[in-house]
Image (spheres, rainbow, N blue to C red):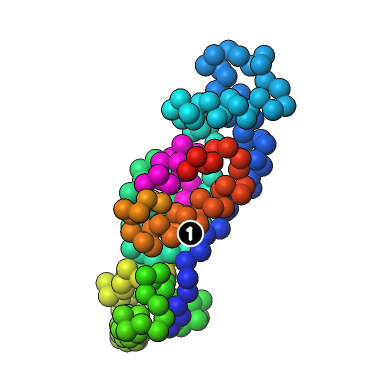
Amino acid sequence: MKVIKPYVIIESKLNNLNILKLIERAGRTAYKSENEINNDSYKSFIKKIIKNGHESVLEHQSISVRVICDRGVSHEIVRHRIASYTQESTRYCNYSNKKFRNEITFIKPCFWNCDSKEYNLWKDVMSNIEKKYMQLMEMGSHPQEARSILPNSLKTEIFITMNLREWRHFFKLRTSLKAHPQMQQIANMILSLFKKKIQIIFDDL
């Protein structure tokens, strides 16, 4: 059994300036103000459209991200409709073979310390699930059958593509203190990376 912390990887090759200048060109089409474009005009223009709620212009750019999280969190992520998803499939992934080192990987819950009674109980349950899964596979079950005993804590990978407007909507909902703690954890990871890679678009979040 393997226990890991969740993490995220930006899969898109991001060129900050190209992204922002394309958004400006798209947005200025509405006003036919392309003649006002200069080296720095995108800064004030994009800030203005976000402030005024004209976020449809942000849909002209998208970002793809790979998220390594537990299955429970992935179920919340895919509730965002305006996006594309490809996810690790428990129907076809056989965790009892060498590709997965003959072990199941679980995501460590962020709300329990490693020395707590709750965490040790959780770890015991995960260990037992792994043992029973392997037994089912040895008995001739197919992965799509054995997966019925796999828990929310199972590690999964999900490849996500959203346009910038939908990413903003995602962050507004999923970084909120009302969101599930593990969902907040993932959303804040992605938002932190985006703020480092892209100017202006996420500054107000």
Considering the whole magenta stretch, tell me its main secondary structure. helix
Task: Judge from the rendering whether residue 142 lies leftward or rightward of residue 159; answer left or right.
Answer: left
Quick one: 90 or 126, which is closer to the camera? Answer: 126
Identify the secondary structure beneath mark 1: strand
Measured as percent of width and height from the top left, residue 132 is found at 30, 85
Task: Evaluate whether residue 68 shows in this view.
Answer: yes
The x and y percentages for residue 63 are 54, 45
Residue drawn 56% across and 29% down? 46
Image x and y of residue 146, in percent: 30, 76
Q: Specify whether residue 58 is painted magenta.
A: no
> Amino acid under label 1?
Val
Give 128 or 193, whichever is nearer the viewer: 193
Which picture quadrant has residue 35? Answer: top right
Q: Which residue is drawn at 55% across and 23% down?
A: 27
Name the residue tied to disc 1. Answer: 67
Report the magenta residues as a range.
Answer: 159-173
Whether residue 145 is visible: no
Could you tell me which quadrant the N terminus lies in? Answer: bottom left
